[in-house]
Image (spheres, helix red, strand yellow):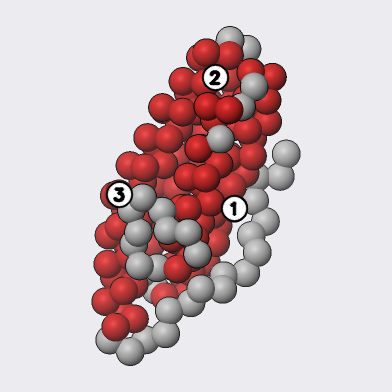
């Protein structure tokens, strides 16, 4: 498994975060005409990841679950706002929104509430409780 820049020690999180980083890493080579499809692919992956993470947190009864879910909802609202903005933006603006704004939104989420959650999950796991890595498939962001 490829590790993300900030490994959290929770396989589902680390695997999904590495996938997102890999997707963002394709931005420099992405042609202007393919920026919106890249954005849509990343947006879908973020949504699917959040759903998987929420199922895992519910199963583990993470204490900050409601806060974490609210953070997911807020970030998904930003993605929706960005989608509308990008639809009419020129390529250099699209590139900046994906490569800087969205990248930082995700990185701040990972370094914030994901890291707090991972501390709970790894402490719980080391105390003997099994950690789930097999959240069921989400139904998310149908468009
Ligand atoms: Fe999260």
The residue shown at (63%, 33%) is 38
Q: In this view of the protein, which residue sits in the foreground, 59 or 127?
A: 127
Q: What element carries label 3?
A: helix
- Give residue 100's position: percent from left, percent from top: 41, 27
Q: Earlier in the sequence, mark 2 or mark 1?
A: 1
The residue shown at (38%, 62%) is 65
Residue farthest toward the front in the current orientation of the protein: 29
Q: Which numbered disc covers residue 111?
A: 3
Position of 84 relative to 139 (above/below): above
Discs 1, 3 touching: Cβ within 8 Å: no
User: Which quadrant of the figure has residue 115?
Assistant: bottom left
Instruction: Measure the alpha-carbon separation of dots 1 and 3.
Output: 19 Å
Q: Is residue 63 visible?
A: no
Discs 3, 2 touching: Cβ within 8 Å: no
118 relative position to 3: left or right = left
Q: How crowded is mark 3: few (under 14 residues within 10 Å), some or many (20 or more)?
A: few
Q: Which numbered disc covers residue 8?
A: none
Q: Which numbered disc covers residue 94?
A: 2
Q: Which numbered disc covers residue 48?
A: 1
Position of 16 relative to 96 (above/below): below
Q: Nearer the viewer, mark 1 or mark 3?
A: 3
Mark 2, ligand 1, within 8 Å: the answer is no
Q: In which quarter of the image is the C terminus?
A: top right
The residue shown at (41%, 53%) is 4
Q: Which of marks 1 and 3 is nearer the N terminus?
A: 1
Q: How crowded is mark 2: few (under 14 residues within 10 Å), some or many (20 or more)?
A: many
Q: Earlier in the sequence, mark 3 or mark 2?
A: 2
How many marks can you see? 3
The residue shown at (46%, 53%) is 17
Residue farthest toward the bottom in the current orientation of the protein: 128
Q: Residues within 10 Å of mark 1 (few under 14, many from 20)?
A: some
């Amino acid at each position: 498994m490829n590790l993300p820049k900030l490994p959290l020690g929770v396989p589902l999180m680390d695997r999904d975060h590495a996938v997102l980083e890999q997707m963002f890493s394709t931005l420099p080579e992405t042609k202007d005409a393919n920026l919106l499809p890249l954005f849509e692919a990343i947006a879908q992956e973020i949504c699917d990841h959040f759903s998987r993470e929420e199922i895992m947190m519910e199963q583990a009864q993470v204490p900050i679950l409601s806060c974490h879910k609210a953070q997911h909802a807020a970030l998904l609202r930003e993605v929706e706002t960005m989608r509308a903005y990008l639809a009419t933006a020129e390529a250099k603006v699209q590139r900046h929104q994906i490569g800087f704004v969205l990248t930082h939104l995700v990185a701040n989420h990972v370094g914030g509430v994901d890291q707090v959650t991972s501390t709970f999950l790894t402490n719980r796991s080391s105390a003997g409780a099994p950690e789930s890595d097999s959240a069921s498939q989400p139904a998310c962001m149908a468009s």
